[in-house]
Image (tube, grey):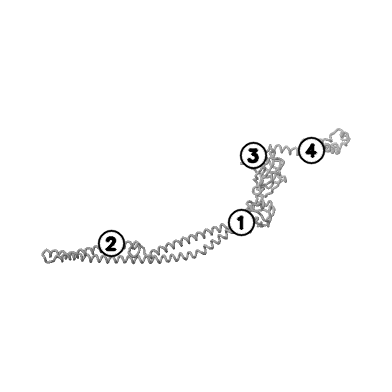
Amino acid sequence: MMDRSRAAVDQGSTPSSQDTKTDAKGLQEALHEQLFANDEPGHAPEAQTAPESGSRWPHLRRGAKIAIGLAIIAVFGWLPLRAILENSSVEAVLNSRLVTLRTPIGGRVAAARGVTDQTKLDAGTVVLRVVNSRSDRTRLDDLRRQKSRLENERPSLAAKLASAQAAQKDLARQAAQFREGRVLQLEARIAEIQTSIEAAAARRDEANAAVERASSLAKSGNVSTVELARLTRELSVSQQTELGARKRLDAAKVELTAARNGSFLGDSYNDRPSSVQREEEMRQRASDLEADLARTDTEIAWLANEIIIEEARFADLSEANITTPVAGRVWEMMTSPGEDVQAGQPLLKVLDCSGAVITANVTENVYNRLQLGDRATFEPNDGGEPISGTVVNLTGAAGAPANLAINPDALSKEPYRVTVASLDAATRACTVGRTGRVVFARNETAP
């Protein structure tokens, strides 16, 4: 019986039978032929010659073989049947996006900490440092020299301003004293003129009385005509003297009003004395020096701000810390300490463990039944816990994303690609590379 079983297996493995039994149905037929090969008529005499006490053993053995065969048929038949009934992928792999860190400046790489492949990193961790010892600092030195020169000139300007302000105050005091003296002088002159006017008025009154007496006496012949003419002339002179004094009084009042307003009128000098003119000139000089000092302070403040900006720029050009923007693992070190790099050159790739995804290849029939947001479950081949997620990308036959740790092009059994975003915290362990399959829910979308 064993010989016939082996013959049946050998016969099923011939090239002619392999062409017709490559699928599950052919495998079932081969197993059926192998299990029931013992039922051929040639074995009936042997079964009949067996003792009566062992007549049940062949039936039990035959039943066990039948059960084993049915179990094998069920297992090998269920796999293709499940693939037909379920919306599942042909192959899938746990994947994650890569973040490429590049240097912003050229220089020499220095290690900021001990970083090797697969080192766990927190967000914001400094992993490398690039130092450029040949960065240009010409402008920074020029700004510092200009600031130093202005700071050295400022005390001199401040001293000149203080001196000019002191001189201006002294000249202003002198001008005030001159104005007060001039006002007093004009007031005294006005008083003197008023006295002269009173005297002239008295003389006029006396001459007027004399003319009246002489006129009365001249009618009676007691006063000669000559005396009357002399008295009349004296009256006229006194009247003119009084009128002139009153004119001088008006002129003196005009000068007093001008002096009180800061203008001085006279024959031997202009309307503004030299002390006032010098005070104005010194005030103008003090104003110019004050403007120069303010401009110097403004330039110093501007240079200080520019120096701060230039120092920051120089620091950025002379040294750069390469930090990780996400938490993850070092996927690939593309440089080493001591190496000279250029600006924009990639230094290392970091695996973004916070955004793990599952990339899968599916058949065209399954792909056409999927929609964005469909629920999906990743079943690892190593027997681990399933990982749930949702469909976030249906690439189809187009090119796969290039920023993934494992290029989806490596899954080459089917050209239709699907990306599933994980919803489980278990993927944060960043076990990228685990293979399995993705089972998609039918007609269910994520809320």
Asked if the residue at tag 1 contacts the one at tag 4, i.e. Cβ–Cβ closer than 8 Å, the answer is no
Q: Relative to the observer, which residue lies in front, 146 or 445? A: 146
Give residue 386's position: percent from left, percent from top: 68, 44
Residue 125 in sight here = no
Q: Amino acid at mark 3?
A: Gln
User: Closer to us: mark 1 or mark 3?
Assistant: 1
Give the labeled residue for mark 3.
371
Query: Counting other residues with Cα less than 10 Å from the Cα at mark 3, is it few (<14), some (14-19), or many (20 or more)?
Result: some
- Of the two numbered discs 1 and 3 on the same chain, state the one appearing first in sequence: 1
Question: Disc 4 residue type?
Answer: Gly
Q: Nearer the viewer, mark 2 or mark 3?
A: 2
Q: Please report whichever mark, 4 or 2, sits nearer to the chain's N-terminal start.
A: 4
Q: Is residue 382 above or below residue 279?
A: above
User: How far is the residue under mark 2 from the one under mark 3?
Assistant: 110 Å
Residue labelled with disc 4: 69
User: Which residue type carries mark 1?
Assistant: Leu
**Residue 390 coordinates in the image, percent (x, y):** 64, 42
Say what secondary structure mark 4 lies in: helix
Label 1: which residue? Answer: 317
Q: Which image quadrant is residue 39 in?
A: top right
Mark 2 Cα shell of 10 Å, populated few (<14), some (14-19), many (≥20): some
**SS under mark 2:** helix
- Relative depth, front residue between 337 and 158: 158
**Residue 153: image location, x then y, percent:** 51, 64
Mark in the foreground, 4 or 2: 2
Q: 30 above or below 166?
A: above
- Tell me the quadrant of the picture where the N terminus can be found: top right
Tell me the residue that label 2 is attached to: 250
